[in-house]
Image (tube, rainbow, N blue to C red):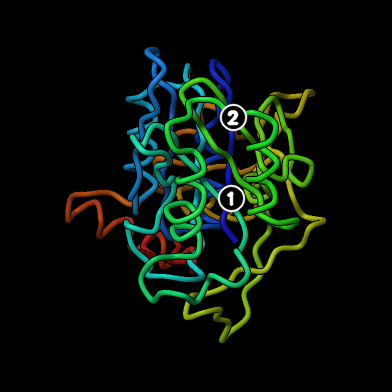
Amino acid sequence: MCIAIYKPEDVVISKRTLKHAWHANPHGAGFAWRTYGGNIEISKGHMTFRKLWRTIQKVGQEHDMAIHFRWATHGENGEGNTHPFPLGRHQQGAMIHNGIFSGIEFQEPIRSDTAIMAEDIISPMINYRTTLNDALRSQIDHAFGLTNKGVILLPKDMHIIGEQNGIWDKDIWYSNSDYAGAKTYWRTPAYRNGYPYQWYDDDDWQDGTPDTNNGYIQLDDREQKAARLWGLNPDKMTEDDLEELLDLMEPTETEEEQTQQLTFHDQLNTHWDYVG
């Protein structure tokens, strides 16, 4: 399904929120940001959450950001089809997308439908521009269609396509609710386009807001199970405890740590951290 996120400057998006988005869309991630000098930089091809999070921490959250998590549908499942895609004659902009561009998704076996749209259609429309006028915004909206959503970041401008169909939550825009965390249901076998598929119950979204009575965090099902496996009380987790738990749930880099984590993830009965 993918999720596109716009985070304004000086607004902080939590590691937990990004982790939820990753688990729902684990086929690669990337982000673009506007530097202090007004340039758009892109970091993409992150095939593990750890690398993505470390890069975001290094860049800092004081910048405007467009963040994307991919669920592969068309084109190769690899770094090249992760978002954002550069826009403009000088690659001065960036674009992320959530949806499927009808009619172009099967044109090529390697490039995704988003890659084709960004590189062949939207980028020439941007040309040398660093801002968008109303006419160009309308043209881009028309090219995206009624159901697609996305974000375009330029040196002096920003445009959310399909903004009304997304969610503003704590000053951050999300193209869907994959960021919120959910109970997960599995069906076996259950595959879509060759990839394991997750089913969500919309009534089970949890926002992770601390309980005002005792300051503890309400964990989602996956986090509750992880807490118990590590000998933690899932009903008495503070924000600091949750941060440590999220670190434990991430894939690690040394062979010894990977052995420990593989055992842990086998117990969780999921392989989402290792897809891609």
Q: Which residue is mark 1?
A: 3
Q: Secondary structure at mark 1?
A: strand
Please name the amino acid that badge 1 sits on.
Answer: Ile
Instruction: Kindly give the residue lying farthest to the top in the view shown.
Output: 36
Q: In which quadrant of the rendered image does the C terminus lie?
A: bottom left
Tell me if residue 30 comes above or below residue 255 in the rendering: above
Q: How many marks?
A: 2
Query: Residue shown at 51%/23% (left/top)?
Result: 64
Q: Using the numbered discs, state the Cα–Cα distance from disc 1 to disc 2 in whole angstroms.
A: 23 Å
Instruction: Kindly give the residue lying farthest to the bottom in the view shown.
Output: 189
Tell me if residue 230 comes above or below residue 184 in the rendering: above
Q: x, y (%) of residue 237? A: 60, 34
Q: Which of the two residues, 75 or 199, is positioned nearer the viewer here?
A: 75
The mark that comes first in sequence, 1 or 2, is 1
Query: Residue shown at 70%/26% (left/top)?
Result: 170
Q: Which of the two residues, 219 or 172, is positioned nearer the viewer here?
A: 172
Instruction: Kindly give the residue lying farthest to the left in the view shown.
Output: 255
Query: Residue shown at 63%/45% (left/top)?
Result: 140
Q: Secondary structure at mark 2?
A: loop
Q: x, y (%) of residue 183? A: 68, 58
Q: x, y (%) of residue 227? A: 53, 47
Q: In which quadrant of the rendered image does the N terminus lie?
A: bottom right
Classify 10 Å Cα crowding around label 2: few (below 14), some (14-19), many (20 and above).
some
Q: Which residue is mark 2?
A: 132
Q: x, y (%) of residue 23? A: 52, 55
Q: Does residue 194 appear to the left or right of 236 in the view shown? A: left
Classify 10 Å Cα crowding around label 1: few (below 14), some (14-19), many (20 and above).
many
Q: Which of the two residues, 261 or 73, is positioned nearer the viewer here?
A: 73
Please name the amino acid that badge 2 sits on.
Answer: Leu
Front of the two marks 1 and 2? 2
Query: Residue shown at 63%/37% (left/top)?
Result: 136
